[in-house]
Image: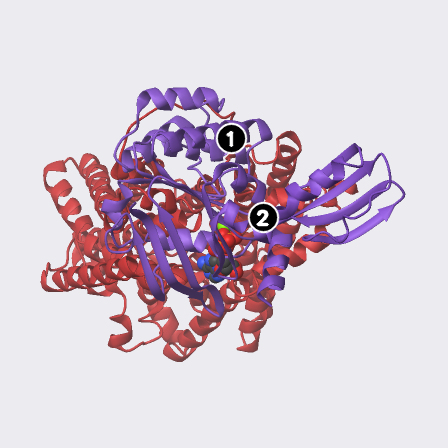
Chain colours: A purple, B red
Amino acid sequence: MTTAISVSGLRKAFGRTQALDGLDLTVTTGEVHGFLGPNGAGKSTTIRVLLGLLRADGGRAELLGGDPWRDATELHRRLAYVPGDVTLWPTLSGGEVIDLLGRLRGGLDPKRRKDLLERFDLDPTKKGRTYSKGNRQKVALVAALASDVELLILDEPTSGLDPLMEEVFRECIARERQDGRTVLLSSHVLAEVEALCDRVSIIRNGKTVESGTLAELRHLTRTSITAELGSPLSGVDTMAGVHDYSAQGNKVQFEVDTAELDAVLRKLTEFGVRSLISQPPTLEQLFLRHYEVSA
Amino acid sequence: MNTLVGTGSLVRLVLRRERIQLPVWILVVSGIVAATASSFASLYPTVQSRQELAASIVNNPSILALSGPAQGLDTIGGMTEWKYGAVACVLVGLMAVFMTVRHTRADEETGRHELLGAGVVGRYAKLTATLIVVFGAGLAYALLIGFALTAQGLPAAGSFAMGLGIGGCVWFFSAVTAVAAQVSSSSRAANGIGGAVIGAAYLLRAAGDSAAEDGPRWLSWLSPIGWSQQMRPFAGERFWVLALFVVISVVLLGVGYALVGRRDIGAGLLPERAGRPSGVFGTFGLAWRLQRGILIGWTVGIVVLAGALGGISQSLKSILDSSPQVAQALQHLGGQQSLVDSFMAAILDVIGLAVSVYAIQAALRLRAEETAFRAEPVLAGSVARLRWAASHLAFALIGSAFLLAVAGTATGLAVGLTNGDVGTQLPRLLGAAMVQVPAVWVLAGIATALFGLLPRLTSLAWAALVVFLLLGQLGSLFQLSQWALDISPFTHLPKLPGGEFTVVPLIWLLVVTAALTLAGLAGFRRRDVG
Ligand SMILES: Nc1ncnc2c1ncn2[C@@H]1O[C@H](COP(=O)(O)OP(=O)(O)O)[C@@H](O)[C@H]1O
Ligand SMILES: [Mg+2]
């Protein structure tokens, strides 16, 4: 297996802000890699370094076997990028921008362009200044997805899309994976990354906190469970991986390490489950857990 | 009135954003008025010495066209107004246009206005807050100039008349821009309209002031810059002219406010047309799409400016023909032809400065694209940084040379056709216009160097242009030493037509341009984008 992106010890400061503080990131060719972190964690900065737009202060970064700063032009032929905040030229139509961006990276597949315009329900004749945020993002997405490239770098690409379009986006990414393309997808929503990615890297304050498959990260995530049972529950509060347990009559509420979820649910069903609400772990909880674990 | 709710806080916001620029503008322009007066006071201390200077001006329509009517020239104040009044009006006009657009249309374009508009802010609050600050600035000019000149012992009536004439221009141009900002949906176009109105105002008064006794002298009255001069500071003040500024500004503001009430936020008056569904162009094609509108607008403006000034030079000639005494008096200055030539040379200097505005604008498009995050998707494509930079710099360099060629052709045709000697005038004036190219390119080079090396300070390119303008206009008056005058690239140009052509300084200017451009490009290659 080859490596599409390999970053180690990357550092970048803007004045007194240390945006990247020894960041590591490895993306294997052909995988969809989630790049997860809260706002201001340094995701966009890392991506800009990888695109050769920013020059790192220290550390090593390699992209598709080349140096992102030195070989920028050649490397960009082989990748497509969707910025987090898409601004378009006010006087150019969406269709013209798609063609322009496609041409700047070595060509578009016209069939795929047409297909994507339909799927994203995008009118290519509108001028840049008349598009909504979501539609501007679609312009950039269509341009990227219709390009014939090896690597897609997407910086929070769904932040302006409605749920319907998010679904279309997920389908498209699934297809990209089938076609064997590598995808780096940055996001601050754990659920999105969970649904799409093979592996994730989680960063915070410019440092990599965790990296691995989602299964490997399970030890860090907790699911909150609220349940109403047929009879009062007993024996769960002492089970391994159960936290913050509270019961009131037949109702219980607790959190459980995702790794122990199966055993706990089996136990619950013994008491007759009437209703069950489970909340997926959030990024914030994951960080809390991480620091508890490492402390 | 709930349509004005929030004006107070917005005034504070505008002042906060202008806290450096606004005081700098006001202090620099007013300070130069004061300095000009004190220079005249020391250079021409006696009435007799001033009358001698006045005698050489009064009958020279070419000087009148460039500066203004000869009135009150036997006083220090009158000379100050004559030398610097029109220039000050142009400068404060530019300030008024830029500032008005920055807080109205530009904020709408970037979406900042939406953020504010969603608060408890009335429909007219943003425009009102902007106008309060800009009109306040106009008043500040009036008072500061008035006090600065009275402090030097000049008569109070004339001092404040001059100040009010300059402040009145701030009001007028701000009011015009308030309308332009509603009509056009882009801030660039609104700035362009404002700039064109300033140019037209300058031209109209140039035509009126240089006209013969029975000629179209009324043209000056169509121009706000003309009004400021028709207030006759230090020459029997006519304060009633101030009413023109007030009435016309109020009418324009009425139009502006009516338009605000009729349109959607973010939209202009013209509906948005659908674009082409597809289109293939590369880096240079993109630059052409982004820059062509501005280049076309400038071409039209330059044709009008150059053609009109070329035409004025002919009316000068007929005045000289009709007055043998004047012609004789001027004979020792080199005769009629040399008089017209020196006028044309002065005109081409003005055009060179105007085209420099275009050159800076075109070069700084790079920075505008970068800060709007529109450079990022292009540079994330397979486009080398230098190629992208070159695509816009081509417009700064080739575009400005093209505009100067247009200016030379237009003046050549205007002069040649009225004289019936196109064959000699066209190549002469075209050549004279092209001599400006290296100096204009130095400004493009400065803009490029700043873009590459000090991207946050690119507006210093405009400051450089203002400094060069002032050095050219006032440098000799202030008796600045030669090395100070030499800072301006325009100092080094041979005075054509009429003067002697020398190639060495032009080569030096090209060398400087190349060095600045290369330094800028090298800096841009190694710096962060964003
Ligand atoms: N051009 C810049 N100048 C100064 N600070 C910046 C700049 N770009 C990013 N930062 C800072 O660097 C940190 C990381 O930002 P960013 O990479 O955009 O975060 P993310 O994309 O993860 O939300 C933030 O603290 C941000 O304020
Ligand atoms: Mg970001």
Q: Is residue B155 left or right of residue A142?
A: right
In the displayed structure, A95 sits above or below B458; it is above
* Residue at x 53%, y 33% (from the top left corner): A134
- Residue at mark 1 shares a chain with residue at mark 2: no
Q: Which residue is mark 1?
A: A130
Q: CA distance from mark 1 to mark 2?
A: 38 Å
Q: Where is residue B267 drawn, in percent x and y?
A: 56, 32
**Image-quadrant location for residue B417:** top left
How packed mark 1 is, by other alpha carbons closer than 10 Å (few <14, some 14-19, many 20 or more), is: some
Q: Name the residue at the right extreme.
A: A249
In the displayed structure, B29 sits above or below B218; it is below
Please tell me which residue lies in front, B319 or B502.
Answer: B502
Q: Where is residue B201 drawn, in percent x and y?
A: 44, 45
Residue B206 visible in the snapshot: no
Q: Which residue is mark 2?
A: B245
**Image-quadrant location for residue A252:** top right
Please tell me which residue lies in front, B109 or B31.
Answer: B109
Task: Look at label 1 and name its amino acid.
Answer: Thr
Task: Look at label 2 and name its amino acid.
Answer: Phe
Q: Where is residue B280 drawn, in percent x and y?
A: 29, 28
Residue B278 visible in the snapshot: yes
Q: Chain of mark 2?
A: B
* Residue at x 51%, y 30% (from the top left corner): A130
The N terminus of chain B lies in quadrant = top right
The C terminus of chain B lies in quadrant = bottom left
In the displayed structure, B158 sits above or below B178; it is below
Please tell me which residue lies in front, B501 or A139.
Answer: A139
Q: Where is residue B22 drawn, in percent x and y?
A: 54, 62
Q: Is residue B406 left or right of residue B197?
A: left
Q: Are the residues tagged 1 and 2 within 8 Å (C-beta)?
A: no
